[in-house]
Amino acid sequence: QVQLQESGPGLVKPSQTLSLTCTLSGGSISSIDYYWSWIRQSPGKGLEWIGYIYYSGTTYYNPSLMSRVTMSIDTSKNQFSLRLSSVTAADTAVYFCARLTEKYYYGSGSYRYFDYWGQGSLVTVSS
Amino acid sequence: SYVATQPPSVSVAPGQTATITCGGSDIRTKSVHWYQQRPGQAPVVVVYDDSSRPSGIPERLSGSNSGDTATLTISRVEAGDEADYYCQVWDRNSDHVVFGGGTKLTVL
């Protein structure tokens, strides 16, 4: 059974870099049909897509966060990571990692949706 | 970038039908997915590819997509359906994921 687990500091100081790791169990992070994603949710707010990474290392980022986000993947450890630099209080949120699955239509075309999520990790930005 | 718009809240009495919409430009050309999020929990997909249900999701939850609006319909609403619901699309032109703002379903 696929499981995702976030880990990392729960408290980060302003202007520093937030770092989180997501560990996959019950599957391979090198599978070609999946993308490995980060989503966050500020207190009382909606879901915000941060970005995703493919096993090859190709990344796709939300334009609003692109200048501060770096994602990486370690296939040997079945892990992928998020780094968010120059954080402020506005970056306080629950950070979820999730598997973005790509499904193909018969003939042509495809779609992507999140089929597995981690439980979420609260990161507070405060001095 | 693509924008998906949801009503902030929907209220419905138990046993009635709840309709949650997700509006976007020509959204019928996109595959829309719906997530249910209960307080303190991670989201769970309840409908994918407009109208498909993952195993374990009751038939009471159904989806449709036409024109500029995708819809999640919950029939015979129960107290346990009270949650936040989010639509999501993947914009293939930009390879970006877009979430709607979310709709809080209240069961009266």
Image (tube, rainbow, N blue to C red):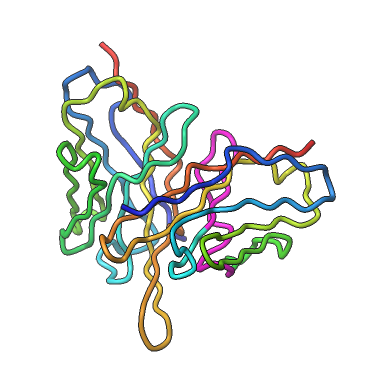
**Magenta highlight range:** B34-52
The image quarter containing residue A18 is top left
| The C terminus of chain B, quarter of image | top right
Q: Is residue B95 left or right of residue B23?
A: left
Q: For the view shown, which residue lies furthest in the right direction?
A: B15
Q: Is residue B56 left or right of residue A112?
A: right
Task: Tell which of B98 and A98 is nearer to you.
Answer: B98
In this view, the residue in front, A94 or B92, is B92
Residue B4 at x, y percent in the picture: 45, 51
* Position of residue A88 measured from the top left corner of the image (x, y, whole percent): 25, 21
Q: Quadrant of residue B80?
A: top right
Q: Residue at x 56, y 60 (%)?
A: B70
Say which residue appears at 42% left-offset and 46% top-offset: A118
The residue furthest bottom is A107
Side (left or right) of B100 relative to B18? left
In which quarter of the view is residue A34 placed? bottom left
Query: What residue is at 19 percent from the left and 47 percent from the top?
Result: A71
| A30 within the magenta span | no
Residue drawn 71% across the image and 55% down it:
B74
In the displayed structure, would residue A69 be above or below residue A93?
below
Place of residue B44 in the rendered image (x, y in percent of width and height, measured from the top left): 54, 51
Q: Does B49 lie within the magenta span?
A: yes
Rendered position, A13 above or below A2: above
Vertical arrangement, residue A107 with respect to residue B107, above or below: below
